[in-house]
Image: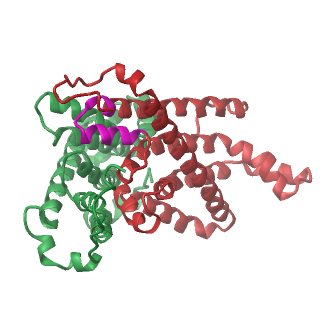
Amino acid sequence: MGGVLAQAPNPIIRWEYFIDEWDQIQQALFEHLELTVYAVLLGLVVSAGLAAVALRFRWTAGPINGLTAFLYTIPSVALFGILVPYFGLSRLTAVLPLAMYTLIILVTNIVAGFNAVPREVREAADGMGMTPARRVLRVELPLAGPYIIAGLRIAVVSTVGLVTVAAIIGQGGLGRLILDGLLRSFWTPMTIGAGLSILLALALDALILFAGKRATPWDRSGRGAL
Amino acid sequence: MVFAQAAERRDIGVFEWLFDPGSWTGANGILASLADTLALCSIVVAVACVTMIPLAAWLAHTRRGEVAVSWTVTLSRAVPTFAVAGLLVPISLRNGWGFEPWPIFIALLLLALPPIFLNTYTAIRQISPSVVEAARAMGYGERDVLFRVELALGTSVIIDGVRIAAITVVATEPIRAFLGGNGLGRFVRDGLGQNNDGLLVAGAMLVAGLAGLTALLFRMFGRVALPDGVRRLATTTTR
């Protein structure tokens, strides 16, 4: 950096920056993607477990929903702040809260998806002699698919948005470009960081939508949960 | 590591700081910051209510805008507040409007609009058609149907939308401290900047506490403000 002087005009965006600082932009973009993927994967694993418990033991559904709703209301700035003394300014400190925020939407949608499987279908599977594990994997999971994918889309899009906030603890991919530009009163990185993070969210949303349609060709309703 | 490098460790105890009256008073104290945060958040939620409740009520009453609703559902969890504010700051500064409050105001407003719109819309649409027909049969005009039947029966769901919006706004407002403003998030920012874990955790507790308090207040308000019958009729929609 350093090439940009205080006297230089400071437009909203300076297109040469894409060429001059491409390495930095690419790195930020990759880090953003990485944090999003880690957080959503972790969230998905935990959600699958919580949803399984909620479906198996019905009375736990209320408390689990309450817990995930409570986690969702904790401000991200507070959550990042509270974890810093324990995990430092690390990737883990960024990923844990991000994963926590995905739980509410993922658990809700997984549970809704499995609940939407008609009882006759489940009974037919049992009648054909499927073991419960096989029935869940081969019959119920595919039928719940559209709901889970709908939840995944919202989780990914909102996580991409929240990753930028992790810039306050030195993580945050494209968010770091925003914060960096702000501190130096240099608008180009801010615009690029903010713009790219919005584009990344849209791109990932479209990707999951497309992949989901390919993976669940039997769902012609075109709608998921919610 | 923008904020986190430099600065020697300067730890003070969390509670030592919280219980020191000096932390609460003064222009940079907790009370002033709290007032700052509350002012912004209330204005945002108020503006969202004033615009979205009439709009959604009218659309729902006239059975219009189904598409808008499905869009709002997707949008409501996806607004990248930090990025939006980040995009708006340069534009605002170039126009001489300063760091605050426009960029963060608009970013927070975008966050508050969807739940209020959505809940008002569904509140009215979920009312059983037979109730509305009965009202019409009794000679209620359009205005009466909207105000005395639809809005009256939908109150609790609408309040629930306002609750979700308020909690989200209060929980997100602290990023303002990192975008050239102040508010309750400033202690988290200063704690990070000064490598001061005590201040950092105390600040985080304040921010989380306010969010919790907001949720609690709305819960109590929801209990007190509604007649039993309406509360029993109502089913909560989103979250």
Residue drawn at 25 percent across, 42 percent down: A183
Q: Nearer the viewer, residue A106 or B150?
A: A106
Residue drawn at 59 percent across, 69 percent down: A60
Q: Nearer the viewer, residue A37 or A88?
A: A88
Question: In the picture provided, is A11 more to the left or to the right than A114?
Answer: left
Instruction: Report which colour depicts chain A.
Output: red
- Quadrant that contains the C terminus of chain B: bottom left
Question: In the picture provided, is B48 more to the left or to the right than A83?
Answer: left
A224 to A191, vertically: above or below: below
As for residue A182 lying within the magenta part, the answer is: yes
Residue drawn at 54 percent across, 33 percent down: A204
Q: Nearer the viewer, residue A124 or A182?
A: A182
Farthest residue to the right: give it: A129
Instruction: Report which colour depicts chain B.
Output: green
Question: Residue B2's x, y, as percent?
Answer: 33, 49
- Number of marks in picture: 0
**Magenta residues, as a range?**
A174-190
Question: In the picture provided, is A97 more to the left or to the right than B102?
Answer: right
Examine the residues drawn in magenta and state their main secondary structure. helix
Question: Residue A161's x, y, as percent?
Answer: 42, 42
Q: Is residue B139 visible?
A: no
Identify the colour scheme used.
Answer: by chain
Question: Residue B220's x, y, as percent?
Answer: 29, 68
Farthest residue to the top: give it: A15
Q: Nearer the viewer, residue B66 or B72?
A: B72
As for residue A220 lying within the magenta part, the answer is: no
Question: Residue A91's x, y, as percent?
Answer: 49, 54
Q: Is residue B196 visible?
A: yes
Farthest residue to the left: give it: B26
